[in-house]
Image: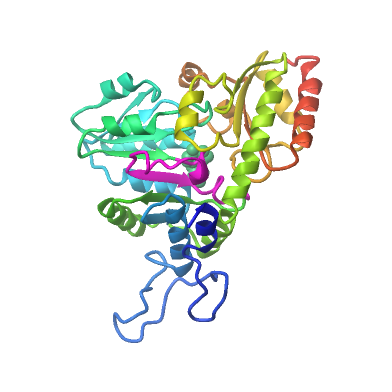
Amino acid sequence: MKFSTRAIHVGQEADTATGATIVPIYQTSTYTQSAVGEHKGFDYSRSVNPTRSALEKQLASLEDARFCSAFSSGMAATSAVLNLLSAGDHVVVGDDLYGGTYRLFSKVLIRYGISFTYVDMSDLAAVRGALEPSTKLIWVETPTNPLLGLADIAAIAALRPSGSCLAVDNTFASPYFQSPLALGADIVVHSTTKYIGGHSDAIGGAAITNDPDLAEEIKFHQNAVGGVPGPFDAWLTMRGAKTLAIRMREHERNAHKVAEFLTTRDDVAKVIYPGLASHPQHELARRQMRGFGGMVSFELRGDGARAFAFAKETSLFSLAESLGGVESLIGIPARMTHGSIPAAERERRGITDSLVRLSVGIEDVEDLIDDLRTALDVSAAPVRR
Ligand SMILES: Cc1ncc(COP(=O)(O)O)c(C=O)c1O
């Protein structure tokens, strides 16, 4: 079956109890047993829930994978993957990544004796140089949040030492545009809060793999730690994911046009979009991805005050954290999504106060461009300092 057919059908057979065409929201914490230990495969909803199971089958199929564990957030999914490690283990991780992931690694996991080396994932020699005998995990985000840098998944997979895993956070590309497992990754992680859910109405995450041993360990931690989504959030995520393909095509079409518009503006110093030939890894994006996604970042000329004024002036682009919903969002990563990264470290990575991140929605693109044009013009004069 092709992508959209899988999105709409896998895990979503008619309900065996009632014939309900749509998977019911099994809003139950427990299940009545006919005798001690005799039940229908469901005993307690932290361990297993039919609505969540349906979502897990659907998401596994979207990554062409065998196993998926769904979580209450992208961070819970990330945490479950890091739970595979023990004190003394080492992780190589990209130096441009979601601020919350950086916070989990640098403020929480480091206290448990796990060490991290941050490298530029586009530099394979740097990745190779960062590997240590104790390296058990390489953590890749591609495209990165917020600088939209790319990592060559197949090349990094080829570098990983035996006994270590490559995990890819595929949130930005979504399974519609990128298949890390097919490129050699061991685990894919998603914040399903973003494109997969697609409507900014549910927080969720997923860890997906083809490896039965990894799947079993992740499932063990899902139950042992307990960061599971409730049935209603699982259901909302599943409903959103049915339309992932058509939404991603629209996101990309609009993002491309928005990126091209921004390149025509004198007050924009730099536009970052993997679909533009000017992106330093445009060729890799063409090779590794089936589309360039819906995220566009750009550097406004002037100081942060100008960027803040601009972000306040848009009306269709809501000034908000998050991304990947049908509605367009605008953010200043340095002060919002990436505020948990120390200022000096942000500056070093190029996450300045003038960097603007757009999650381009699927509204009519002419309206989106008008909104950006007006906000740029209004915020240009006088430049507020
Ligand atoms: C790339 C990426 N990974 C993971 C996360 C964390 O996901 P959640 O907010 O669902 O916990 C985010 C959130 O913005 C993200 O952008």
- Residue 376 placed where, x, y %? 76, 22
Q: Is residue 78 visible?
A: no
138 part of magenta stretch: no
Where 3 falls versus 53 (above or below)?
above
Residue 33 lies in quadrant: bottom left
Residue 358 screen position, x and y as percent:
64, 32
Residue 202 can be seen, yes or no: yes
For residue 95, side relative to residue 14 (left or right): left
Q: Main secondary structure of the magenta part?
A: loop
Give the number of callouts: 0
Please identify the residue farthest to the left as the structure is shown. Answer: 133
Residue at screen point 51% across, 24% down: 282
Image quarter (top left, top right, bottom left or bottom right) of the C terminus: top right
User: What's the magenta region?
Assistant: 170-199
**At 81% from the left edge and 26% from the top edge, which residue is drawn?**
374
Give whichever of 182, 214 is nearer the camera: 182
User: In the rendered image of this protein, does residue 160 appear above or below residue 3?
Assistant: above
Q: Residue at x 34, y 46 (%)?
A: 81
Q: Residue 112: image x %, image y %? A: 28, 39
